[in-house]
Structure formats: structure tokens, C-alpha cells
Amino acid sequence: KPSDPNAAGAEGAEGKDTCTVADLQVTATPGEPTFPAGQLPKFFATIKNPTKADCVVDFNTNQLKFEVFTMNNYERVWADTDCNAPEVTGDVTIPAGRSVNYELEAWSRTTSAPGKCDNRQPVSPGNYLLYAHVGDNTSQPATFNLG
């Protein structure tokens, strides 16, 4: 279960002269509120640096990851890094007071788990929660529906 993002100290980071991954404000956004049957969902992550210092993030150790959970029983059904290499690697500088945006082109609407990439099952229509992570820094959940 994702940890409370406020516990990481992102609140009050605006005045800081230093920046760590815990200071970043991570936001997950589905491309649509509802994806009709047959449409592959797109997901977006916005990573904002609210501090007064540039933030150098090593995405090799602080992986950018999208995760999807069912809303009704909070079951983890998929993450983009379960079966694919991370989209972003190496050091990325997020300038002070600025945001960077990342897009996940298409989720196959099938299940996955770490190392379980064979025999992936289609997920059911319904309501889901999307999270974006940068290392241990987790976004608030964003809701979306699959038709």
C-alpha cells in the first residue's frame, strides 16, 4: 500500500534551499476520465520541484513508475515497470520552481506483477486508481474508469 505522500515532507518544501526526491510533488493524471472499451489508456506524471534549488534525480535508483489499483477492493493490477524497462533512466535535473511531465503512451489493459508477464489477463471494466511514483515519493491517487 502506498505510503502517505505528506509524510515525506513535501509540505513546506517551497522555502528550502536544497532539494531531495522527498521534496518533489508528484501528480498522476489519466489521459481521460473514462477510456471507452478498446481504447488503451494514456497516463501522465507531473513532477514539480517546489524548492529554491535545482533537483538532480537519479531515476536509476528512484524509479519513475505508474501503478493501477482497483477502486472497489484496492487490488494492485498493473505497473508499467513489471514487464518493461523504466522509461526514464539516469540523472534528470528538475529546475527550482519548475515541473517536468512524463507520458506513458498506452496501457494494454491487462494485468501484471513483478516478473509475471506471461498469461496477462484483461482487466474488467470499472473504476480504478492511478498512482505515479518517483522512488518512495508517491502521488495522490487519481481516479479513472474503463468502459
Image: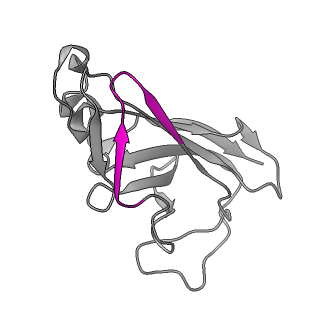
Q: Which quadrant of the structure image shows residue 18?
A: top left
Q: Position of residue 2 (x, y in %)?
A: 31, 46
Q: Position of residue 122 (x, y in %)?
A: 68, 69
Relative to 139, is 115 above or below?
Answer: below
Residue 9 highlighted magenta (yes or no)? no
Q: Nearer the viewer, residue 105 or 147?
A: 105
Spot the residue most to the bottom.
118
Report the span colored magenta.
89-101
Q: How is the image coloured?
A: one colour
Q: Position of residue 13 (x, y in %)?
A: 22, 21
Residue 96 highlighted magenta (yes or no)? yes
Q: Position of residue 70 (x, y in %)?
A: 53, 51
Q: Residue at x 68, y 58 (%)?
A: 106
**In the figure, is residue 47 to the left or right of 143?**
left
**In the figure, is residue 29 to the left or right of 113?**
right
**In the figure, is residue 6 to the left or right of 81?**
left
Q: Nearer the viewer, residue 132 or 53?
A: 53
Relative to 117, is 66 above or below?
Answer: above
Q: Residue at x 70, y 35 (%)?
A: 33
Q: Which quadrant of the structure image shows residue 30?
A: top right
**In the figure, is residue 64 to the left or right of 50?**
right
Q: Residue at x 46, y 56 (%)?
A: 75
Q: Residue at x 80, y 54 (%)?
A: 39
Count of labels in the image: 0
